Each structure stands twice: as C-alpha cells, then as structure tokens.
Image (cartoon, grey):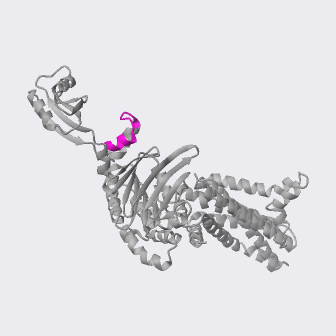
Amino acid sequence: MIRVNNLSKFYGGKRALGPVDFEIADGETVGFLGLNGAGKTTALRILACDLRPSSGTVNVGGIDAIANPHDVRKRIGFLPENPPLYADMAVTDYLKFAAELRGMSKAEIKRRMPDVLDVTDLTLVSNEVISTLSHGFRQRVGVAQAIIHQPKFLILDEPTRGLDPVQIVEMRNLIHDLKQNHTVLISSHILTEISQTCDRLLVLGAGQLLGAGTEAELVGSKSDVRTITIAVKFAALPDDPRAAMQALLQAVDGVTDVGVPYEQAGAYTFALSTTRDCRADVSRAVVAGKHDLLKLDYTRSELENTFIRMVGVPASSGATAQGANDARN
Amino acid sequence: MHGTKAIYLRELGAYVRSPLGWVIAAVLLLVDGILFQTQALSGQQLSAIVLERFFWSTSGVVMIASIALSIRLIAEERQNHSIVLLTTSPVRDAAIVAGKFFAALTFLGIVLALSLYMPLMIKVNGKVTAAQIAVGYTGLMMLGAASLAIGIFASSLTRQQLVAAVLGAAMLTLMVMLFPLAKRVDAPLRDILSELDLWWVHYQNGFMRGILNLKDVIYYVAVTYFFLLLSVKTLEAKRWH
C-alpha cells in the first residue's frame, strides 16, 4: 500500500505539486495522467525517493519514505523519463551493477539474470554495449534495471516516450506481464496508453489532483454531455442552414445546441449537443422535414473529452490542442 | 559502505573503457617525460636536485590530470541522467562519492606508477634512496587526492563538464596561490593562509624534498575529506531541488 497525505513540492517559490492525497493498494496498476508540467514526474520522483517533498507524508509498504528512504528504495524499481543507462557498458554488466547497488549477492544476480532478460526480451542483445542499442531496447534495459531486484512497487515515468508504434505495443505487453507481480505506477499524457494499461487513474493538473477512479468512473462522473453528429441534405437549401436545423430540432427533447455546420458535396454536417441519446427523435424530425439524412453518429463523452474538461483548458487554447494531440498519439 | 565497491569498479572500468582515461594517461606521461628531459636532466646537477625537479614538474601535471579525471564523475552522470540509478538505489551519497573518488585515485596511481622509470633512472645513475622516491610519490598521491576531491566537488555543482573544469581549475589555482598571497598580508592571516596553501608549504617544502611530515599528511587528508564532504552535501542538497 502507498499512502500519500498532504504532499507538496515547491521549486523555489513555485508550487509544482500539491497538496495532494491518494492511496494505491497492493497489486493495483495506477496511471498518473496529466498534461506536461502537471506534476506527474515530481510526484513519481518523490515516491521513488529521488526527490524530497516540501511537506506532507509518504508511506510505502508501511515505511515512512521521508524518514527511511533507504528502506523504501529497496522495495521500489524506478524507470525515469530518461532511462538511467551507462552507454559504455554491456547490457548484462549494467544489470549486474544495478543489482549490486540494490544489495543483491552474486548468487542472487546469477539466478535472477536469465528471468529478467527473458521478461524484457533482452536475451539476444545481452552482450551488446548499450550505446549500440535502439531506443526501444534501451527502454527495455531501463525496465530491466527497475525489476532486477524484484521490487514490490514499480514506478514507470512515461515508459513509451519516443517509441515507435510497434515498440509501444511491445512495451504495453511488457507492462501487462509486469502487472502480475508488481504494484505498478505509470505516468503518461497519452490517454490510450493509460486507459489500456491501468486499473485506476489519478488525473493531475497544475499540481493538483483533479480526479481519481477507474476510467468508467471518471467518464461516468463527467458524462452529462453527449454528441450526435448528423449529415443532412436539405430538400431546398435554406439561407441559414444552422437556423433551419435549430428550428427543425426545437421540439426534440434533449438537444441543447446545434453546432456550426460544414458543407461537403451539398450535405451539411452538424454536431448536436444533447443530454440523452435522442437519435431516433432527431432522425424522425429530419425525415419529417423532407430532408435526406445521410449520416447519424452518436458519441458519449469519452476519456479524452473527460480529461480535457478535468484539466480545465479552454478549447481554443494552444495548450488544449497540444494536450489533445498528445492524447491522441 | 554498501555500494561503494560496485561504484568503484564501474568507474574504474569506465576509465579503462573510455578513450578519455587513456588520453589523460598518455598526455600525463608524455608531458612528464618531456619536462623530465628538459628540466630535470638539464646541466650537471646533484641527483637529489634532479629528483626534486622531477617531483616539481610531475606535481603540476598531476594537479591538471586530477581535474581532468574528476570533472566528469558527477556532472556527466547528471547530463546523461544515469545518476538517477544511484540516487534511487539504497546507497548513501557518501558511498557514491567515495566509490568515484577511489576509482579516480586508483587510475591516477596506475598512471603515476608508469612514470616510475624516471626516478629509477636517477637512482641507478645517482645517489638517491628508495625512501626519497617513496616519499615523493606519497606526496604526489596526496596532492592528487586533494586535487581529485576539489574536482569532484566542482563536478557535483553542475551538469556541464566544461563549467566543472573551470570551477575546479579556479579552486585549485586559488589553493595553490594562497602562499604567495600570504606573503602580502600580515600575521595572523599570513600564517593561516600559508598553512592552507595546497602546494608550496606542504608539498614543495616537504614531500618534494623527500621529507615526510605528519603535519603535511594530516593537511592533505583534511583537505581531501573536506572537499569530499562538500560533494556529499551538494548531492544531498540537490535532492531538495
């Protein structure tokens, strides 16, 4: 169990994190979600005892991480954003070094090494010098050093950063394997990665904890807005298509707004904001007006929308565009 | 201290694996050999004077080599982010600094051992004792240890190796210039500055002439310990940032 109370971190006079409170149960896989600068890395570095908090308490497996960081470090494996590698060392030499730092004996290292190389799929490159490895393999070596001492808690900061799509899938599979034996904390601003890997999410924004729960819980709590997209070919083109559609759907219960349409090949596509699934009523109203209904899509508020609303960034800002783009990656 | 041996062996291996270690060793031996040929062996001199001149020129080379060997030890780790492996392992900051210091000192010792042929030539052809040579080399190692400690402290302050080199060289130069500076001020400041001087008082007047003073040994141990302690405290302080 990891228990964090009233945790804050200031860099100079600037607050980077907190105060935040959260708990992570044994065996859970928890994702720290937030835009760049949200405080994810700061939180993970504090949990890994790499950084001291300005205030608050951190209890890892029943041990006070601030009073006894050494005891906590023995129980934690940490993969930072940039894997802590020595490029001049061969993979096995590096892993032996990492294991010795964690206090493992030669016999223990010898027993453990084949398993770690196997789990991280490094057996074929075990004698290669790290500087000659691809980015994906380096990331795997970073994971290998984090698990060699069989820590109870595994902290992975942006584990898929810089990986190509194939490597991302491989890393995701690796994390799924690691979930069997470790309590895993992952930070990312990539929603698909987090949603596919984690049991529970902690959403951070500007150093504050904005929400916590499973993906369904987070989406459900914020899912008061639904979107219906329709493409309509008018029987007679009105002067103002949006006003015409608003008039047409005025009587439909649940439609709260009709978005500005775009025109393509004579058809107008509208995004309708609704408070319920009223597709049947919308289609009936359009057909009753003698118009052609060419398309009808329904989307509930999904994690991406939930996330953007939670971090509270205006839709028109560049930050949102960046966040949304990152989120889609 | 747990972790010191692992870090010591890794760092020593890094010197051997990287071209930097060998370049520093080659330059040290080359410059030392040239200075021996042009300075120590010039003209007719007593063999004891020749030996003194050898230790005089070698001390300068040792101080420069020590800075070159030490500046990468922590700054490079910060630059490459590899220091996180050390700082998130159950290893004390003192163990990190100690492992790196002893690795650099060992490498310096190996390189200095390769220069031993020069004083041995003086011994074979002149009248110097093995004890004189041993005391001189002890002084070089102590001067080297203090210079390495200063370099490691400079390395702990920044992630830029060039900045660390400039800082280390500046601190070392200041320590060497304390004695000339002391001559320009009055007592008791003069006495204090003289005793703190890194080279003139404790090396030139002692080890270089084959004189082993306990006071000089204590001075170098204290300077080395002081700068290593500063390095440890700097590492600890960085955890707050």
Q: How many marks?
A: 0
Quadrant in the picture for residue B168: bottom right
A10 on left or right of A36:
right
Please identify the residue farthest to the right as the structure is shown.
Answer: B186
Say above or below: B90 vs A261: below
A194 on left or right of A250:
right
B222 on left or right of A63:
right
State whether residue B115 appears in this view: yes
Q: Position of residue A307 (x, y in %)?
A: 35, 44
Q: Which residues are magenta?
A: A305-318
Say above or below: A48 vs B142: above
State whether residue A87 appears in this view: no
Q: Position of residue B43 (x, y in %)?
A: 85, 67
Say above or below: A229 vs B185: above
Please identify the residue farthest to the top as the structure is shown.
Answer: A239
Q: Nearer the viewer, residue A194 or B72?
A: A194
B116 on left or right of A106:
right
Q: Position of residue A272 (x, y in %)?
A: 22, 33
Say above or below: A163 vs B204: above
Quadrant in the picture for residue B192: bottom right
Quadrant in the picture for residue B150: bottom right
Q: Is residue A220 magenta?
A: no
Q: Position of residue A321 (x, y in %)?
A: 37, 39
The quadrant the N terminus of chain A occupies is: bottom left
Q: Nearer the viewer, residue A13 or B93?
A: A13
Q: Is residue A309 magenta?
A: yes
